[in-house]
DNA sequence: GCGTCATTTCGCCATCTAACGAAATGGTAT
DNA sequence: ATACCATTTCGTTAGATGGCGAAATGACGC
């Protein structure tokens, strides 16, 4: 119950569902998510911590960057099942499709440039 | 997205998940849920309103009583899918199994007697 | 019609949550 | 070593949420 409630509470927020949907297309680094969601880095980081605690996502360090991806089955089968269902259900929504579209552009931008831009504005 | 978020927010509360799990065994009237959850009738009623707005449950009037049941597919396929998955996932948890056990006793009690008891204590 | 009774609505309070900016952390590159 | 930079942690604030009791609602039975 505790485990399932953590997952459900983690997914009871628009931005976190958008994050999960975005990650269904592959891993992303924090600065890319910040750009997508248009939230402060600190806020985004908090969301990632909540998703990670619910075992919905995993993280990987690479140099200065941290990449997040959807967690595998072995982390929490329940989390994977719920994430898969929710991703499928929101896939068609306007918001998520717009995110997917914008994400294609964001991925093209060099990460160094992306981070530099964020620190200026 | 809006529809899915309403469902996810509705299920982001322990008591509401317990209610959905309890209803998976068949319809229940409010006084039975009050007895199960040990919450104030007003609080329970609020929870039911939230579940109903998310189209997770339906209600039916019978005399003085109101019976709630899990909503059918035609109300919201998404709600039904999520409810089915969540119910399956929490089924084995201690809390939900204890609820199921206690529910068997509660159902045996005459509803008139149940309501009378609630108004006294 | 009138009281009774199950349920809902309302008003209030305590707690939680999402947001931000500022400061801390930990790795890279000079 | 030092400066830099992506990310996290901390402290604060505004708004949402869950809880209750009191009052309103609406159906039943006398």
Image (cartoon, coloured by chain):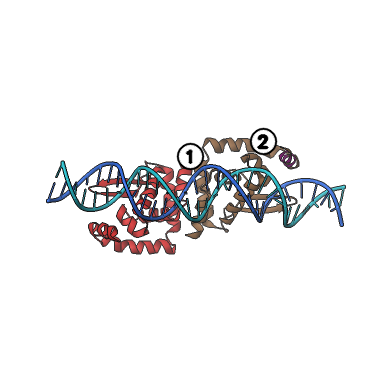
Chain colours: A brown, B red, C cyan, D blue
Residue A120, position as x, y percentages in the image: 74, 38
Graded by Cα atoms within 10 Å as few (under 14), some (14 to 19) or many (20 or more), the crowding at tag 2 reads few
Q: Is residue B36 visible?
A: yes
Residue A37 x/y as whole percent: 61, 40
Tell which of A112 and B10 is nearer to you.
B10
Residue B98's mark? none
Residue B101 inside the magenta-drawn segment: no
In the rendered structure, find residue B2 and report the number of the disc placed on it.
Answer: 1
Can marks 2 and 1 be said to lie on one chain? Answer: no
Q: What quarter of the picture does the C terminus of chain A occupy?
A: top right
Q: Which residue is mark 2?
A: A105
Mark whose residue sits in front, 2 or 1: 1
Q: Determine whether, in the image, residue C20 is placed left or right of residue D16.
A: right
Which residue is pictured at 38% across the width and 64% down the height?
A: B98
Taking depth in this image into account, of A51 and B89 the one nearest to the observer is A51
- As displayed, is residue A111 above or below residue B86? above
First to last magenta residue range: A114-119
x then y, percent, for residue A21: 57, 44
Judging depth in this view, the residue of A43 and B86 nearest the camera is A43
């Amino acid at each position: 119950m505790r485990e399932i409630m953590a997952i459900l509470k983690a997914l009871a927020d628009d931005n976190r569902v958008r994050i999960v949907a975005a990650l269904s297309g592959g891993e992303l680094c924090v600065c890319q998510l910040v750009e997508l969601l248009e939230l402060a880095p600190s806020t985004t980081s908090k969301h990632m911590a909540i998703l990670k605690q619910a075992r919905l996502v995993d993280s990987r360090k690479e140099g200065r960057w941290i990449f997040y991806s959807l967690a595998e089955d072995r982390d929490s089968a329940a989390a994977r099942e719920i994430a898969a269902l929710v991703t499928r259900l929101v896939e068609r929504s306007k918001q998520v499709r717009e995110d997917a579209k914008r994400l294609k552009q964001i991925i093209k931008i060099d990460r160094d440039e992306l981070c530099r831009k964020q620190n200026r504005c």
